[in-house]
Amino acid sequence: MQAIQEIPMTRNALDIAELANRYYGDVYRFCGRRVGSDLAADAAQETFLTAQRSLAKFRGESAAKTWLLGIANNECRRQLKMKRREPLPITLTPPTPGHESSSVDRQVLQQALDKLSPILREVVVLHELDELTYQEAADILGVPVGTVKSRLHAAFAQMRQSLFPSVGLEGGLR
């Protein structure tokens, strides 16, 4: 009987294992917010499989987490297209204790967010809910930082218009 030979772990396999240990939870939550809990595990797994295949091409121009979230974003889009499903509506998390009072009703804020186009909603989610920097959001979306900033500006202007219709876009009263 021949002994089973142990396969040595390559540097790429070690790297992807380290990335998975460190960032799986972040990638899973990112995917869950976009495709739902029923597809999140599959999307996260595919993200790491794609990352493993592409690891040699990773140049380190962005943080590893940002690179993984970019792959996850593409994988979530692919999963939704494949399953012929719409992206999940973005749900604002309930306020934390001690932060219940707000000048804007959460339901009204949710409605304003829902009125945004998918492109504008995506940058708001990345920057405000996922708490990513402009650069990280730009890296994930594959667009320049200026595009992220202009989309955020447009999104916030539309949301202000929805939230405070009596105030013009320039901030003055109508």
Image (cartoon, rainbow, N blue to C red):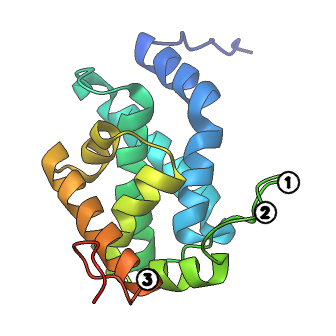
Q: Which residue is mark 1?
A: 97
Q: Amino acid at mark 3?
A: Phe
Q: Residue at x 52, y 25 (%)?
A: 19
Q: Which mark is residue 100?
A: 2
How far across and down, in percent of the image, does residue 142 sit? 20, 49
How far across and down, in percent of the image, does residue 35 sit? 54, 70
Q: Amino acid at mark 1?
A: Pro
How far across and down, in percent of the image, does residue 50 sit? 38, 43
Which quadrant holds the C terminus?
Answer: bottom left
Local crowd at mark 1 within 10 Å, few (<14), some, or many (≥20)?
A: few
Give yes or no for contact between labels 2 and 1 (Cβ–Cβ under 8 Å): yes
Q: Residue at x 27, y 53 (%)?
A: 141
52 above or below 84?
Answer: above
Q: Which residue is mark 3?
A: 164
Instruction: Name the side, left or right, on which 86 lies relative to 59.
Output: right
159 above or below 55?
Answer: below
Instruction: Name the side, left or right, on which 63 lies relative to 9.
Output: left
Local crowd at mark 3 within 10 Å, few (<14), some, or many (≥20)?
A: few
Q: Marks 2/1: CA distance? A: 6 Å
N-term mark: 3 or 1: 1
- In this orientation, does residue 83 appear? no
Q: Which mark is residue 15?
A: none
* Residue sitting nearer the eye, 164 or 147: 164
* Residue sitting nearer the eye, 114 or 138: 114
- In this orientation, does residue 162 appear? yes
Q: Marks 3/1: CA distance? A: 26 Å
